[in-house]
Image (tube, rainbow, N blue to C red):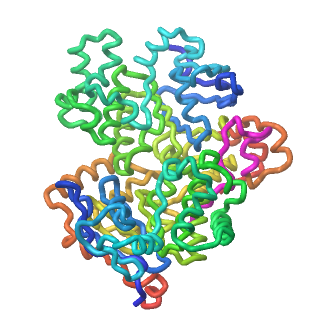
């Protein structure tokens, strides 16, 4: 069995009386790609924020590269070591980049923070990272306001890759982009995964996107995992009514929004009587313990 | 009532002089028939929202417009402000993208829905009764008490229904919807769209639906206009657009959209969308187009009709896009 790049067990987070994330478990093999899907309030963003340490879980375990990070980091060195392993790209590149910092300085900052490099080494690594995402010298000297949305998101990706993370969390990272630009960024992400072996965790509500970028899928509803498995299988034959609802909600020819609205109300009513519990929803499908090539070899 | 419900002819809009009178729309022509749902699709900077807002006379401050823009035969551009207010109250309504940004958070829902009716002289009591019926028709439970609640007490999806109720208050013939579901979850989007399509059919309203989402436009519209850099580059039936896109930009957009039912991965269109002000001479899409040839950068392609589709591409006849 290979060691997981990321392993999460029984993650739970409450805000006051509200249980935002309730017993969420999953794993991501090295170089794998997993999508967490659900609508607002499903707990997908809270889950992502706990993984990178922006929220502290009330219960559960998070392991990155086999190392436990459930407890608060003791000291700066541990905190930095954790940050190196997992990085995040946010949804809105108009908010996530400091408007006063040039692209070059933005990408150099994590290099300065995490590695002891000479200025020349740092510049070289910076240029390598920018080239990796398709940006050149002209963009390096620019402030974010001079860049388009797509270019900004390339900067955010370059910066996130600076620490050579094992896992990159993409929180709706292409949702704010024009569709012709989104496809360019998806191409870039696929290339980077192939070349560097970084694992991706997509946080999104766009199932059509998931279909093309994720090996595995995890469906969250009201903080709980209601279905999980290989993307192809789950999308071809969804077992949980909520997954089916999400799937039917994607606009396409022959779309029937009235039926979806009725299904949604029926689901909400049914779940009010019996809320989804990890015990009853599980095991619909399990996230495979191995990566996809080993899985097909085993079959 | 004469003429088409909405007819825009060669609408050109320039921003206020001063810095530079930047053009933002370049000769946009489109129409919406009575009871027809029409999509206006484009990426950021394409001018789709400006086009939509101009129907209500909402041009950017100091902007100058030429061409014509008629609702039921009446020209908006030359209309008196009194008549324009009346038109906005009764004939044409707009649903904006973000209900939280478009509904006054300090006022009760009842105030919002009845505003136009009260301005038109409907007594408060009658207006509230009518507002209650409207809230019920958009699926708000307990519409009576809802009238006394504030926007923050509603979810985004519920508040968007409130906005639809408000838009319907004057009994409009034409509904302008500017990305009305972009800020919503997919399941909520379906619900709001189903309400919108049902009410549109029941009341036989025409609708101009602005979106960046081609699939969504195709799912609810009869005809679709595709905009790029302040101009309309293609117009045809939703079916035709998907089956036989005629403009390279349309086929590029289709190829870039991730599909649930297709194994084909999305392909990006090189470069980035430009606005009309940045667009070079000739075809604005030429710099990103895989089928570009020297003539494309020399003159602006004129609209031609090919098999029921309106296309602005020099090579539209020879290129077949799958």
Side of A178 where A135 appears, left or right: right
Side (left or right) of B159 relative to A136: left
Where is residue A229, by image quadrant? bottom left
Horizontal relation, residue A135 to residue A164: left or right:
right
Let me know if residue B265 is in the magenta part: yes
Q: Which of A133 and B78 is in front in this view?
A: A133
Task: Please name whichever residue, A28 or A218, is drawn nearer the observer in this view of the structure.
Answer: A28
* Position in image of residue A32 (x %, y %): 47, 76
Task: Give x and y (percent) for residue B236.
Answer: 61, 40
Q: Can residue A76 be seen in this view?
A: yes
Image quarter for residue B78? top right
In the figure, B291 relative to B54: above or below?
Answer: below
Which stretch is magenta? Answer: B263-288
Determine the residue positioned at 19% across, 54% down.
A16
Which x, y percent locates residue B44?
58, 42
Q: In this view, does B93 lie to the left or right of B320?
A: left
Residue A125 is one of the magenta-drawn residues: no
Give the quarter of the figure containing the N terminus of chain A: bottom left
In the image, residue B147 above or below residue B271: above
Viewer-side residue, B300 vs B288: B288
x 61%, y 41%: residue = B226
Majority secondary structure in the magenta region:
loop
Above or below — where is B82 with respect to A181? Answer: above
Q: Residue at x 19, y 52 (%)?
A: A269
Judge by depth and name the residue closer to the eye, B153 or B78.
Answer: B153
For the C terminus of chain A, the image quarter is: bottom left
**Where B317 sits versus B58, above or below?**
below
Residue at 30%, 60% in the rendered image? A242
Q: Mark yes or no: residue A132 visible.
A: no
Q: In which quarter of the image is residue B233?
A: top right
**As drawn, which residue projects farthest toward the left?**
A273
Q: Position of residue A74 (x, y in %)?
A: 34, 73
């Amino acid at each position: 069995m290979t060691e997981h790049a990321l392993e999460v067990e029984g993650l739970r987070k409450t805000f006051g009386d509200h249980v935002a994330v309730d017993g969420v478990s999953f794993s991501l093999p090295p170089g794998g790609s997993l999508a967490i899907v659900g609508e607002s309030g499903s707990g997908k963003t809270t889950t992502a924020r706990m993984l990178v340490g922006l929220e502290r879980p009330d219960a559960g375990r998070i392991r990155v590269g086999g190392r436990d990070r459930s407890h608060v980091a003791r000291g700066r060195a541990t905190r930095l070591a954790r940050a190196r392993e997992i990085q995040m790209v946010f949804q809105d590149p108009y908010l996530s980049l400091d408007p006063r910092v040039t692209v070059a300085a933005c990408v150099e900052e994590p290099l300065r923070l995490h590695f002891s490099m000479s200025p020349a080494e740092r510049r070289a690594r910076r240029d390598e990272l920018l080239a990796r995402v398709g940006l050149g010298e002209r963009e390096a000297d620019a402030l974010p306001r001079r860049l388009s949305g797509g270019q900004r998101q390339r900067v955010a990706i370059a910066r996130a890759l600076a620490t050579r993370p094992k896992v990159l969390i993409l929180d709706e990272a292409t949702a704010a982009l024009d569709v012709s630009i989104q496809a360019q960024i998806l191409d870039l992400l696929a290339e980077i995964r192939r070349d560097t072996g970084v694992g991706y965790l997509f946080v999104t509500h766009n199932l059509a996107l998931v279909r093309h970028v994720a090996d595995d899928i995890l469906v969250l509803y009201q903080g709980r995992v209601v279905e999980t498995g290989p993307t192809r299988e789950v999308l071809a034959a969804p077992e949980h009514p909520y997954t089916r609802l999400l799937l039917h909600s994607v606009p396409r020819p022959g779309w029937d929004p009235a039926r979806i609205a009725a299904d949604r109300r029926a689901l909400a009513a049914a779940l009010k009587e019996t809320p989804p519990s990890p015990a009853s929803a599980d095991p619909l499908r399990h996230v495979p313990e191995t990566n996809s090539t080993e899985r097909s070899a085993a079959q | 009532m004469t003429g088409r419900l909405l007819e825009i002819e060669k609408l050109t809009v320039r921003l206020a002089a001063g810095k530079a009178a930047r053009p933002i729309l370049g000769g946009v022509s489109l129409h919406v028939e009575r009871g027809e749902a029409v999509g206006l699709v484009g990426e950021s900077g394409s001018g789709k929202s400006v086009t939509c807002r101009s129907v209500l006379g909402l041009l950017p401050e100091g902007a100058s417009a030429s061409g014509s823009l008629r609702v039921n035969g009446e020209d908006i551009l030359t209309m008196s402000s009194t008549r324009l207010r009346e038109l906005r109250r009764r004939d044409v309504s707009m649903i904006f993208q973000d209900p939280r940004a478009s509904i006054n958070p300090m006022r009760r829902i009842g105030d919002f829905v009845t505003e136009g009716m009260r301005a038109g002289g409907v007594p408060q009591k009658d207006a509230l009764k009518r507002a209650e019926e409207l809230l019920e028709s958009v699926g708000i439970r307990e519409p009576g008490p809802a009238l006394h609640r504030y926007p923050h007490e509603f979810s985004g999806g519920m508040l968007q229904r409130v906005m639809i109720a408000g838009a319907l208050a004057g009994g409009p013939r034409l509904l302008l919807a500017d990305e009305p579901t972009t800020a919503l979850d997919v399941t909520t989007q379906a619900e709001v769209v189903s309400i919108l399509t049902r009410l549109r059919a029941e009341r036989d309203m025409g609708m101009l639906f602005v979106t960046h989402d081609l699939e969504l436009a195709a799912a609810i519209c009869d005809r679709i206009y595709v905009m790029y850099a302040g101009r309309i580059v293609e117009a045809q039936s939703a079916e035709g657009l998907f089956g036989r896109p005629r403009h390279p930009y349309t086929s590029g957009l289709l190829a870039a959209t991730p599909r649930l039912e297709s194994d084909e991965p999305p392909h990006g269109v090189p470069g980035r969308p430009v606005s009309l002000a940045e667009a070079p001479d000739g075809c604005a899409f030429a710099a990103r187009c895989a089928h570009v040839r020297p003539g494309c950068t020399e003159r602006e392609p004129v609209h031609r009709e090919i098999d029921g589709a309106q296309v602005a591409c020099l090579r539209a006849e020879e290129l077949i896009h799958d």
